[in-house]
Amino acid sequence: MVKRGGPTLTERRAEELRMTIAHTAVEIFVADGDTSATVERIANAAGIATRTFYRHFAVKEDVVQPLFRHSASLVIETLRTAPEGDDIVDTLVAAWTSAMNDGVLSPFDRRLLTLIAESPQYRLRWLEADDELCDAVAEFLAKRLGRADHPLSRTLPAYLVVQATRHIFMQWVTTSTDEDIAELLRAGLSTVLDGVAAGLPAAARE
């Protein structure tokens, strides 16, 4: 059997359509200031039938998943291609700000993240997307920290890093602070990694 390389043309077109629908939906959400727009309204604005929407998304809240997948792919690519000599925290900050323009979150994206953070069902999609990043972060940290033998030394730092970044972003977008998100991430991640290094069981540090 010949091993497939990347996604097929049909798969790429389907993902492009999902992304188009996602962009249409979030533009409506931000314009409205809430996420109450119906599937029918989103489908009409995207120029598709309602049944086409449901062919790609099981429920309305899933419409943001293509955007989170895209952001996650940028995070993973940044971690995997970062030069080994680069500072760990700087690389993590660069990864989580990779979807921003020059490290700055646009007013549109900030309003969107605020809406998502304030809606339990959409916030759950954010959590699910972040959880899928744990393996890539664990792989990155294991290479840099050299503590991959003990299960906790591989999974705990990655879990804490991912949870910390989401918490920092959620606090940042919902408090309307003017603080630099990169600096907040840098301070938070430094604290997390310092704490993990000091708090792991002795067996995990050997």
Image (cartoon, helix red, strand yellow):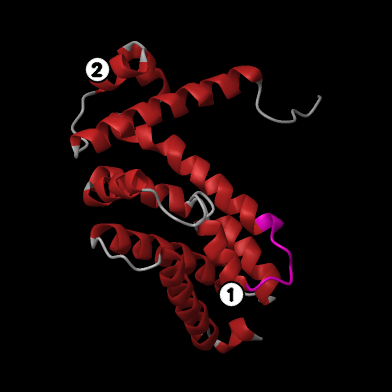
169 versus 1 height, above or below: below
Quarter holding the N terminus is top right
Nearest to the observer: residue 145 or residue 95: 95
Does residue 198 sit above or below 137 in this rendering? below
**SS of the residue at dot 1?**
helix
Q: Which residue is found at the position 45% from the left and 53% from the top? A: 130
Front-most of residues 203 and 81? 81
Which residue is labeled 1 in the image?
A: 153
Which image quadrant for residue 85? Answer: bottom right
Is residue 151 among what the camera can see? no
Q: Nearer the viewer, residue 7 or 191?
A: 191
Look at discs 2 and 1 and give the one toward the viewer: 2
Q: Earlier in the sequence, mark 2 or mark 1?
A: 2
| Residue closest to the eye, 90 or 13 | 90
| In magenta segment, residue 202 | no
As drawn, is 100 to the left or to the right of 83? left
Q: Which residue is drawn at the image coordinates 36% and 65% (left, top)?
A: 168
Q: Can you identify the residue that label 2 sits on?
A: 40
SS of the residue under disc 2: helix
Q: Residue at x 45, y 35 (%)?
A: 66
Residue 86 part of the magenta segment = yes
Which residues, given as a range, are shown in magenta? 80-87
Alpha carbons under labels 2 and 1: distance apart = 48 Å
- How many marks on residues? 2
Q: Type of residue at label 1?
A: Ser
Image quarter of residue 94: bottom right
Residue 146 lies, in percent from the top left, at: 70, 76
Q: In the rendered view of the protein, which quadrant contains the C terminus?
A: bottom right
> Where is residue 113 drawn, in percent x and y?
32, 49
Residue at 37% across / 12% down in the picture? 48
Image height check: is 94 above or below 61?
below
